[in-house]
Amino acid sequence: MAGISLNGAYNHFIQDYVSKDVTHADTHRKEELRDVYKSIAKLNKNSPLYLLTDDDKSRNDAIDIKERARQLQGNIIGLNNQEDKSSLDHSSGYTTDEEKVTASYIGKNPEEDVGNIGFDISVSSLASAQVNTGRFLPKDGTGLAADNYAFDVRINKQEFEFQFSIYQNDRNIDIQDKIAKLVNKASIGLSAEIVEDNQGRSALTISSTRTGLKAGEASQFEVFESSSGLQTGSVSYLGLDQISAPASNAHFALNGEEKASVSNRFTVGGKFELQLKSTTAEGETISVGVKKDNEALKEHIASLIKNYNDFVTDASGEKNPKFKSDKLKSEIVGIAKQHMANMEDTGIRLEGNGTLSIDDELLTQAISGAESNESLAPVKKFAGALLDKAKDISVDPMKYVDRPVVNYKNPDNKDFNSPYITSEYSGMMFNNYC
């Protein structure tokens, strides 16, 4: 009977309290967990002794408050992956001809790099893979006797043996199909397929899945007859060793300086990742640089405002005498009021119910203007303050639940840390992501 009761309690806890939307923002480094502990310990060092109400409603309210704060914190952090979690710096790489070269910005200092770094590139050749195209043979023809065959492939200084059987009624197309499946299933960096010519004949092509040649390489792979003792002749009959397109490196020039790469995708100076898609005409150059990604920035700000509004709306919900929803809402709205005077030029307005609205035209002007960094500085500060408040609520959600003071600690005595008092109903129950 005790086991059944325990299972029931566990299932109730899993269904009603455990977060169902754990995100990357809920993972922490050791130093971050240490900071959370220190915050809780500091809060409780001189905290008075409270009388906590022993009822389900208060427990649920404390858990809901903590969960809302966690979601708000996670949503703000999830808006970007930069170290400064409240940052609104959105930048992207650009080229003057996206059909021939594309660029992604991978630098760490977008504010410094926008408009200040870049180069010209011209592309003389693209990196390519080695392709072996076999002999075109009549599909229904035969030329190899029934037997057990084998051939070898050398790739990346390793040799692989492929064995297969040919039966009495196997046609050329059947043999080609068997070998294609063997090569593809092996997953050794090669792919195979059957192609046809205009006469309806078929041939087996084997291609490398990588491009370019490393230093000292003459080819990416070699196909040759096996010396295992099994029947030979399949390589010469099918033409598996015939190179129809040798591998080659990409050749290009950065600001006139000749460069080469084994791949059409590579990084430059730790700031850009380039993808070569086509060659350029003689004398043609393509400019590469960094610009502000205004659309991403607008979406970021809109998401920030939506997350704030959702939190305020939730705090304005069901009224419970023991839940201090007005206190929670006023503190969050107070943060918006504190920063509102400086955010109005960006088109962000505070409504009568405490939510925020956005004038899209004004926001677009603020983002695209020459002084956009200065215009958006108040929004960055608002995002940072909102993030700090979400962390504060997560540390002590019980302050929004009715809890009469029993007695205050004597400030003259040395007090000991009691870090789990604030988490009696909530924090300990959420160790699945803390």
Image (spheres, grey):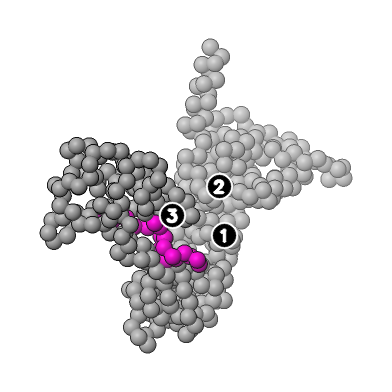
In the rendered image, which residue does mark 1 sit on? 85
Gap in angstroms between the C-alphas marked 3 and 1: 45 Å
Disc 3 marks which amino acid?
Ile
Whether residue 207 appears in magenta in the rendering, the answer is yes
- Characterize the local packing of mark 3: few (<14), some (14-19) or many (20 or more) Cα atoms within 10 angstroms: some
Magenta segment boundaries in residue numbering = 204-222
Asked if disc 2 and disc 3 are in contact, CB closer than 8 Å, the reply is no
Percent of width and height locating residue 288: 44, 78
Residue at the image point whose x is 73% and y is 44% from the top:
41
Residue 184 appears left or right of 344? left
Query: Toward the viewer: 432 or 128?
Result: 128
In the rendered image, which residue does mark 3 sit on? 155
Label drawn at residue 203: none
Instruction: State the image quarter where residue 427 is shown.
Output: top right
Tell me the element at label 1. Answer: loop
Disc 1 marks which amino acid?
Lys
Query: Toward the viewer: 277 or 224?
Result: 224
The vertical placement of 69 against 243, above or below, is above
Percent of width and height locating residue 80: 50, 60
In the rendered image, which residue does mark 2 sit on? 26
Tell me the element at label 2. Answer: helix
Q: Earlier in the sequence, mark 2 or mark 3?
A: 2
Query: Toward the viewer: 128 or 317?
Result: 128
The vertical placement of 387 against 140, above or below, is below
Tell me the element at label 3. Answer: strand
Disc 2 marks which amino acid?
Asp
Gap in angstroms between the C-alphas marked 2 and 3: 43 Å
Instruction: State the image quarter where residue 400 is shown.
Output: top right
Query: Toward the viewer: 320 or 171?
Result: 171
Percent of width and height locating residue 347: 44, 71
The vertical placement of 405 against 291, above or below, is above
Residue at the image point whose x is 68% and y is 34% from the top:
51
